[in-house]
Amino acid sequence: MARISTPGIWLPGPLNTINSTSPTSQQDIAGNPYFMGLNPGKMVVLGAAEAQNVAAPGSTLYDGSYQYVHLDSGATAAYATEGFAAYFLLDQGGPAQGTNPETAYQYFKVTTGDVANALGLNNMFCGVFINPTNRDGNDYTPTPGNWVEIFVGGGRVTVQVGAVANVALGDAVYPDSGHIGKFAGNAASSTTPIASGLGMVAGTDGNTAVAFYKDIIFHFPN
């Protein structure tokens, strides 16, 4: 049984296909949420077999922690898919990023690498998107403005490898300087400690690798 922060969690489908307009993943025809155990910031901690049991057919999920978050409406859908980096969004609609009260952070909104770069949030890595673009003829790309699950550490995850540097076994693995959320490998550590994983399966430009993040990136919304 999955080790979860609150007993009785309900999933509306495979973990890496969730793309819901509801903060609880279910709602009535009037848009009122049903409270089924999944709510903003809910974290699910899974072993390898448990994760694969809740993965979409034909896809792979690994051991680790997964969290239900709100994808910012201004995010880029193509960069919110499997293996791309997710970033904290601090504010939405003002005041400027880095100025209190940082309501988007409190609400746990995440965004994509291109938006993070434009807003000066390149170091605000907070996880990895997990929804595949195409499995068994189905497109699970998240819709900006919806609620999704992301990987937040404590295990392994598939990452997209960019053109900056390939990922080798044992490399430090972190979001690259291409600023769309792909990853690079380096024998040296990342200058952004929270973003640094460990290469477990090698990967080259345009393909995927698998990285291990030993620490969970803890953040729970108001």
Image (cartoon, helix red, strand yellow):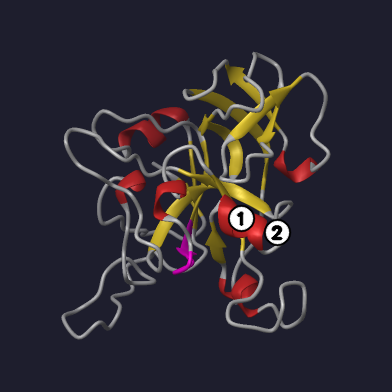
Quadrant including the N terminus: top left
Left/right placement of residue 69 relative to residue 216 reads: left
Q: Nearer the viewer, residue 26 or 20?
A: 20
Residue at x 68%, y 24% (from the top left corner)? 185
Indicate the quadrant containing the C terminus: top left, top right, bottom left or bottom right.
Answer: bottom right
Please give the name of the residue rendered at 39% of the width and 71% of the height, measured from the top-left corner: 23
Left or right: residue 36 compared with residue 129: left
Q: Which mark is residue 121?
A: 2
Mark 2 nearby-residue class (10 Å; few <14, some 14–19, many ≥20) = some
Res 191 quadrant in image: top right
Look at mark 1 in the image and give the residue it sits on. Answer: 87
Q: Quadrant of residue 199?
A: top right
At horizontal 72% and vertical 36% (from top left) the residue drawn is 196
Give the number of callouts.
Answer: 2
Q: Which mark is residue 117?
A: none
Could you say which quadrant of the image residue 102 lies in?
bottom right
Give the residue at x 63% y 58%: 116
Residue 11 in picture, x, y percent from top left: 30, 55
Magenta region: which residues? 68-74
Name the element at disc 1.
strand
Determine contact: label 2, label 1, CB under 8 Å: yes
Residue 123, position as x, y percentages in the image = 74, 51
Q: Earlier in the sequence, mark 2 or mark 1?
A: 1
Q: Looking at numbered disc 2 in the image, what kind of residue is underneath it?
A: Leu
Q: Is residue 194 magenta?
A: no
Amino acid type indicated by mark 1? Tyr
Q: Mark 2 against mark 1, which lies toward the viewer?
A: 2
Position of residue 161 measured from the top left corner of the image (x, y, whole percent): 55, 28
User: Residue 152 location, x and y as percent?
Assistant: 58, 47
